[in-house]
């Protein structure tokens, strides 16, 4: 995938970072896209594609001639004063900008363990009908290397792509195509002596995570309207992707968690969460998934995914979260 879109200087300036690799070269990125594709990238970096326009008042003789340049993002303000005509290029950025309640937070990419994106169709989109169906508003949760979380009710990374290497060559994945990404250390190539050495003693298996704790999963969350457990039409695509994955992974079992926002009593929300989880279970069964592979649990309002007290957060907490077990 190659990224050909461009962004203006004002957007790039908001992402300005240092002129060093955004992620260490000995890191990897495990990526899952909204289309269900999985990628393992080595040498991951965030690349921003841009167009530099000359200062206002300058009128280049041939605006249809665009010169390609390559620079770090921090160089752009200086380059803008020097160009005599439009120039295009790309550069790395080392930060991800997340917004919550209109307040932006810049997080160094090297501090992020995982990024989970969420998207909802924009109602009454101003875009033409033939592209309005693909007009989404994005939110995100970043889990940092120290275990803390940063919640964002709005994300727009412009024309940023996640770039990395695969055995087949370089891959550029536009950020809008990424559902989740997890960063980790790269595997170190073994020497001949290491390959010949006996395997290390097997350590005691770690305690499995407590059932229901939100985690990166190949299955997509399903969201609900307030005080409703009926499936919305706009969730069918996510449900069908979940069915497709489960049919391709016959050994996998799934726990469907029902969650609610904080409004209502604990007892009512536990019952509502149960109805939401059962609605997902029933859909999976009708779609051909064996009943023995699907179990449900309700957490009601006890485990909110986004910690705040308004609709911008509540809409993400009204959900069914699907956790894969073996």
Image (cartoon, rainbow, N blue to C red):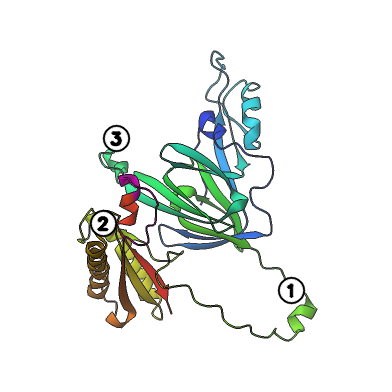
- Which disc number belongs to residue 126? 3
Left or right for 4, reference 241:
right
Q: Label 2 to label 1, Cα distance in Å?
A: 49 Å
Q: Label 3 to label 1, Cα distance in Å?
A: 55 Å
Q: Which residues are magenta?
A: 301-313
- Along the line of sight, which residue is nearer the eye, 180 or 300? 300
Is label 3 or label 2 in front? 2
Is label 2 or label 1 in front? 2
Labels 3 and 1 touching (C-beta < 8 A)? no
Give yes or no for residue 311 being in the magenta stretch.
yes
Q: Residue at x 58, y 44 (%)?
A: 95
Residue 4, image x and y in percent? 50, 41
Residue density around tag 2, few if under 14, some if 14–19, many if 20 or more, within 10 Å: many
Identify the residue under disc 2. 224
Identify the residue under disc 1. 190
Question: Helix, strand, or loop for circle 1?
Answer: loop
Q: Quadrant of residue 87?
A: top right
Residue 129 lies, with reference to residue 23, above or below; the image says above
Question: Helix, strand, or loop for circle 2?
Answer: loop
Give yes or no for residue 248 being in the magenta stretch.
no
Q: Residue at x 63, y 83 (%)?
A: 203
Sequence-first disc among 2 and 1:
1
Question: Helix, strand, or loop for circle 3?
Answer: loop
Sequence-first disc among 3 and 2:
3
Q: Residue at x 55, y 24 (%)?
A: 53
Residue 30, image x and y in percent? 54, 62
Residue 47 lies, with reference to residue 299, above or below; the image says above
Left or right for 207, reference 153:
right
Q: Quadrant of residue 275?
A: bottom left
């Amino acid at each position: 995938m190659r990224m050909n879109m461009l962004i203006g200087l004002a957007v790039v300036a908001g992402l300005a970072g240092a002129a060093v690799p955004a992620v260490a070269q000995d890191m990897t990125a495990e990526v899952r896209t909204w289309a269900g594709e999985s990628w393992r990238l080595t040498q991951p970096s965030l690349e921003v594609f841009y167009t530099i326009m000359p200062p206002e008042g300058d009128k280049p003789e041939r605006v249809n001639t665009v010169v390609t340049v390559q620079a770090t993002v921090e160089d752009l303000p200086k380059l803008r004063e020097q160009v005599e005509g439009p120039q295009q290029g790309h550069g790395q950025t080392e930060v991800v900008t997340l917004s919550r309640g209109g307040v932006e937070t810049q997080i160094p990419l090297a501090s992020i363990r995982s990024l989970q994106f969420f998207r909802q169709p924009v109602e009454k989109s101003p875009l033409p009908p033939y592209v309005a169906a693909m007009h989404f508003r994005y939110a995100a949760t970043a889990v940092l290397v120290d275990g803390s979380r940063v919640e964002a009710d709005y994300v727009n990374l412009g024309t940023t792509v996640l770039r990395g290497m695969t055995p087949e060559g370089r891959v550029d994945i536009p950020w809008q195509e990424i559902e989740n990404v997890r960063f980790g250390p790269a595997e170190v190539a073994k020497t001949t002596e290491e390959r010949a050495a006996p395997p290390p003693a097997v350590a005691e298996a770690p305690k499995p995570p407590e059932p229901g704790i939100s985690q990166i999963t190949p299955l997509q969350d399903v969201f609900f309207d307030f005080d409703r457990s009926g499936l919305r039409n706009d969730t069918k695509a996510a449900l069908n992707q979940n069915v497709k994955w489960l049919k391709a992974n016959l050994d996998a079992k799934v726990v469907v968690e029902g969650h609610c926002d904080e409004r209502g009593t604990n007892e009512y929300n536990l019952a509502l969460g149960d109805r939401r989880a059962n609605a997902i279970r029933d859909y999976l069964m009708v779609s051909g998934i064996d009943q023995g592979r699907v179990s449900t649990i309700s957490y009601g309002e006890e485990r909110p995914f986004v910690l705040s007290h308004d609709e911008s957060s509540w809409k993400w907490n009204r959900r069914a979260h699907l956790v894969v077990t073996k």
